[in-house]
Image: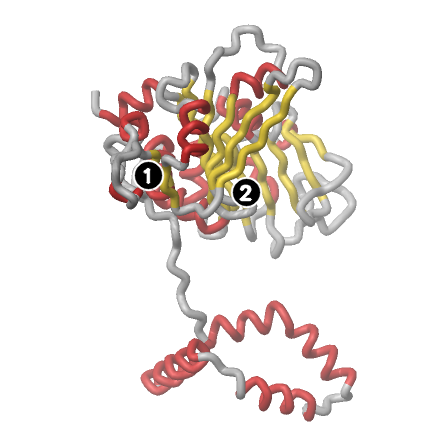
Amino acid sequence: MNAEKRIETMLKVQIDWLEFTVLNVPLPKVINTLDLGWMDFSPLAKGRFGYHNQLKWQGGSIFVMFTANSDVVDLDTKINLQSGIHVMITGQGCRQYSAKHDLMHLIRVLSAHERVNFTRIDLAIDDFESKIVSYDKIHDAAIKGHFTSRWSKWDEVTSRQTSTNAFLGRTMYFGSQASDLFCRVYDKTLERKINSDQKDIPEKWTRLEMVYRKDRAKKLVDHMINGHKSPGYVLRGSLKQYLRFILPIADRNQARWPTAPWWSELLSNVEKLQLTIEKEDKTIEDMISWVDHQISPTLSAILEAHEGDLAWFRSILVEGSKRLSQKHKDAINQFLQKEGTLA
């Protein structure tokens, strides 16, 4: 058994949150893509995230959000295609959905559509005995400063019982929770004892989660689908890129300290996973599209208020020409060269 299979046999890896937006697709088709029936959903009184309407799966925590063009929501309902349809499958929803469906298959189907934006994916790794991933071990190393990270901060959140001072919850965050990528480690045993009536809860259960949003979620899907990497591989590859626990030696440079054996074991046989997407420079066509979608109504309103007089607009253009950045100039030159080639 290779190292990856051995680690993923010892530890449970799962998709613990899935959120995506589908554009220019009818509502029934999105429901069908989930491999669920229209009758499996019930309307809620309010929408969410700016959407006016919301459906909830009767089998668990799956929410479908959209803005309907009418007061009646049914199979024939027309929706605002520009804002699209937003689907949120929470952590509990992922477990409920996975009882009869394959989340990786769903991601694979969704990734084949050009008009799907993955907005959040959480991957979780559970160590039910805290043999490798241990909250106490990670906390002790963090407190002592025995780690290096590309994240500039880490936080700790704890809660205690007033009468006994016993812990009710312990969570660590590496990276900002407001960012598009961060790591969360928590004592799952405490969390489950507080929020569940389950009797057979493991006594030393640690969960480590990676939260990927926006471009990071998009890149994650690319690694899993086009790179043919398992959720366990990409989670551990992400950790290898962003976090390293180390053993102190007589050297002031922590970069030369050896990796802690338990961390090496967790990340054995994986490469660092690149999760950034290099943004392309804006072209003149991109700028025209932005003006059209974002400020053309505003410009039209000002023009109408001035009864067609463009003097104000010419003044704005003259002032704007004085503030052109090098990126603007490069876009102009690229556009002129392309126009010349086409001519």
**Mark 2 sits on what residue?**
177
Residue 106 at x, y = what percent?
45, 35
Dot 2 or dot 1: first in sequence order is 2
Q: Secondary structure at mark 2?
A: loop
Q: Nearer the viewer, residue 316 or 325?
A: 325
Measured Cα–Cα span from mark 2 to mark 1: 19 Å
What's the residue at 63%, 18% (across, down)?
A: 195
Residue at the extreme top: 199
Dot 2 crowding, Cα within 10 Å, few <14, some 14–19, many 20+ = some
Q: Nearer the viewer, residue 103 or 198?
A: 198
What is the quadrant of the N terminus in the image? top left
Residue 250 at x, y = what percent?
25, 37
Residue 318 at x, y = what percent?
58, 90
Q: Secondary structure at mark 1?
A: helix
User: Which residue type does callout 2 highlight?
Assistant: Gln
Q: Is residue 295 above or below residue 201?
A: below
Dot 1 crowding, Cα within 10 Å, few <14, some 14–19, many 20+ = many
User: Which residue type does callout 1 highlight?
Assistant: Lys
Q: Quadrant of residue 282?
A: bottom left
Residue 240, which numbered label?
Answer: 1
Is residue 121 among what the camera can see?
A: no
What's the residue at 56%, 70% (across, down)?
A: 290
Say left or right for 98 vs 82.
left
